[in-house]
Amino acid sequence: MTERRPLVLVSGEIKELPSGDTLPSASGGWTLISSASPSGVASVEFNDVHLHGYGQFLFRIFDASHNGGTSQNMHMALSDDGSNWGASQTLSASVASSAALGGEVLFPDTASTQIWCVGRANDTTAGNRTSNTGAHGQTCRLDAGLQDIKFLWSSGANFDGSSLIEFYGRA
């Protein structure tokens, strides 16, 4: 069977990508560092993020849901030493356990001790017509720099089986 190559536009003509050439990353140069599919746990931690050598981080959240009996908000907390966590910051509106959240959190400059990030997780449940698209921006001071990032639910609910969080970095 003949190898199928991706089609590309070259000088106004559609051609097969020459063997040995690669397409640029569809994710804008982001490299997947790790991912987590939490189930039955109250939080998800990404530890020692500073050791990866990237100047920017991106977290992508897919189908995040919880098993709490009451509505919950997704939160994020940051640490500069792996033990002590700052106050958690809200990433989502309060959602029932039947909801599924999706979104992104961007850390545009991880080298500073003044860490700023922006992002939001929105209800992506089929049929949801609620508009909750406003982004949350937040700043925190981490004297030793950003080391660990944790995602959790507001009232201690556990993540359930469909949740996925991906961690990306880029220069």
Image (cartoon, helix red, strand yellow):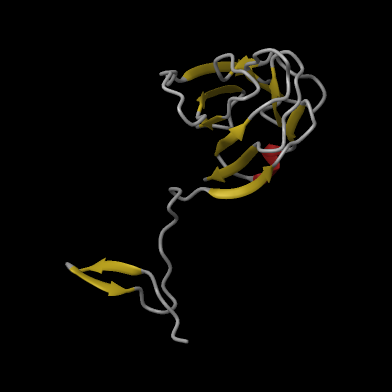
> What residue is shown at x 30% (from left), y 67% (from top)?
8
Taking the spot 69% from the left edge, 14% from the top edge, the residue there is: 154
Left/right placement of residue 96 relative to residue 120 reads right
- Picture residue at 62% right of the left edge, 31% below the top: 64
Residue at horizontal 51%, vertical 48%? 30
Nearer to me, 94 or 107: 94
Q: Quadrant of residue 145?
A: top right
Count of marks, rendered view:
0
Residue occupying the far right of the picture: 83
Considering every residue shown, the one lying at the far left of the view is 12
| Residue 5 rendering spot, x and y as whole percentages | 40, 74
Q: Residue furthest bottom?
A: 1
- List x then y, in percent, for residue 156: 77, 17
Q: Position of residue 22 (x, y in %)?
A: 43, 68
Residue 134: image quadrant is top left
Left or right: residue 101 versus residue 38 is left
Q: Is residue 39 above or below residue 83?
A: below
Residue 131 shown left or right of residue 125 in the figure = left
x then y, percent, for residue 95 = 59, 17
